[in-house]
Image (tube, rainbow, N blue to C red):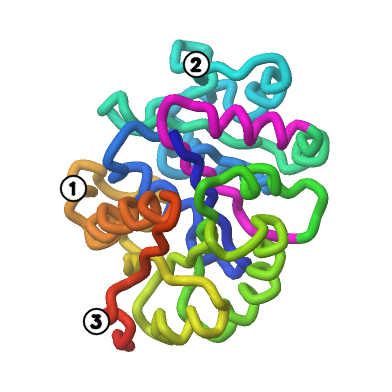
């Protein structure tokens, strides 16, 4: 199946929240993998510390050079259930950002292992910087690399050099896209023109739902009907479509003039 990498230019546009929204509405089996070198946030956030910590990314790093097999969902395995469906799983990230430097040599093997899973994998790669601990192998291996930004001048300004980094890493723009968070600010057409890569999808700035996903605040029973989750159900197929050879989807023309 396919590996998708999500990242940000900084400024907290909500990469982890977006990765969770996409994973919880993904049309097929999926693993959300916390590959942010700054550390994982989902166990302490969405699950509010109530979920026992699985072996997670660090366990994968210890084993990735020796085998390429499905990640374990058994008790004491690598993965934890993201919901009750049995189709959506979590590969928890680092518990301490000081572990990231030691993890750096393992990223190529981790990337190959994630890409070899029998289901889709959405990798939350956090903020893209120039440091050596970055999961660049995950981005280079991904079918699509999605930069999550808000449609503001500050975010577009921060995104530009990082898009240049991705163009060099991915060998061109074919596997790179933008996912916008919020509707106030620059239009998708303006952002595509500024950055030279298409806007694949747009999700609302829905602070109430984001609070549920990022900090476990509120009731999950009504989560599926929230604006963020409804948008995620459309964004997922758009990102998946972008990973297919020869297809470069973007938002329809009717969306480019939205400047609420």
Could you classify mark 3 by the number of other residues whose Cα lies within 10 Å: few (under 14), some (14-19), or many (20 or more)? few
Residue under the image location 46 percent in, 86 percent down: 190
Q: Residue 63 carries which label?
A: none
Front position among marks 1 and 2: 2
Task: Examine the rendered structure and indicate whether residue 51 appears above or below residue 101.
Answer: above
SS for dot 1: helix
Residue 179 image offset from top left, x and y in percent = 44, 65
Task: Pick whichever of labels 3 and 2 is earlier in the sequence.
Answer: 2
Q: Are marks 1 and 2 in contact (CB under 8 Å)?
A: no
Which is nearer the eye, 135 or 95? 135
- Residue 163 in the image: state x and y as whole percent: 64, 69
Q: Give the range drawn in magenta.
A: 106-129
Is residue 257 highlighted in magenta? no
Q: Nearer the viewer, mark 3 or mark 2?
A: 3
Nearer the observer, 84 or 180 = 180
Visible in this render: residue 55? Answer: yes
Q: Image check: 232 left or right of 198? A: left
The numbered dot on residue 222 is 1
Residue 72 image label: 2
Q: Which of marks 1 and 2 is nearer the N terminus?
A: 2
């Amino acid at each position: 199946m396919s590996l998708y990498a999500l990242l940000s230019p900084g400024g907290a546009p909500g990469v982890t929240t977006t990765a969770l929204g996409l994973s919880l509405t993904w049309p097929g089996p999926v693993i959300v993998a916390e590959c942010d070198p700054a550390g994982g946030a989902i166990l302490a956030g969405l699950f509010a510390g109530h979920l026992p910590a699985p072996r997670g990314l660090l366990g994968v790093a210890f084993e990735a050079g020796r085998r390429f097999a499905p990640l374990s969902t058994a008790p004491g395995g690598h993965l934890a259930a993201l919901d009750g469906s049995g189709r959506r799983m979590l590969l928890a990230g680092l518990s301490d950002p000081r572990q990231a430097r030691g993890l750096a040599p393992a990223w190529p093997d981790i990337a190959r292992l994630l890409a070899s899973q029998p289901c889709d994998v959405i990798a939350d790669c956090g903020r893209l910087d120039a440091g050596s601990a970055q999961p660049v192998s995950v981005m280079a291996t991904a079918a699509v690399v999605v930069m999550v930004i808000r449609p503001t001048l500050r975010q577009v300004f921060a995104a530009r050099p990082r898009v240049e980094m991705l163009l060099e890493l991915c060998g061109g723009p074919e596997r790179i896209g933008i996912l916008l968070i919020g509707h106030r600010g620059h239009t998708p057409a303006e952002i595509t023109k500024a950055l030279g890569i298409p806007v694949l999808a747009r999700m609302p700035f829905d602070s109430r739902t984001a609070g549920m996903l990022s900090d476990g605040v509120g009731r999950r029973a009504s989560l599926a009907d929230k604006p963020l989750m409804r948008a995620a159900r459309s964004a997922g197929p758009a990102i998946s479509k972008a990973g297919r050879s020869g297809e470069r989807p973007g938002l329809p023309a009717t969306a480019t003039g939205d400047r609420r």
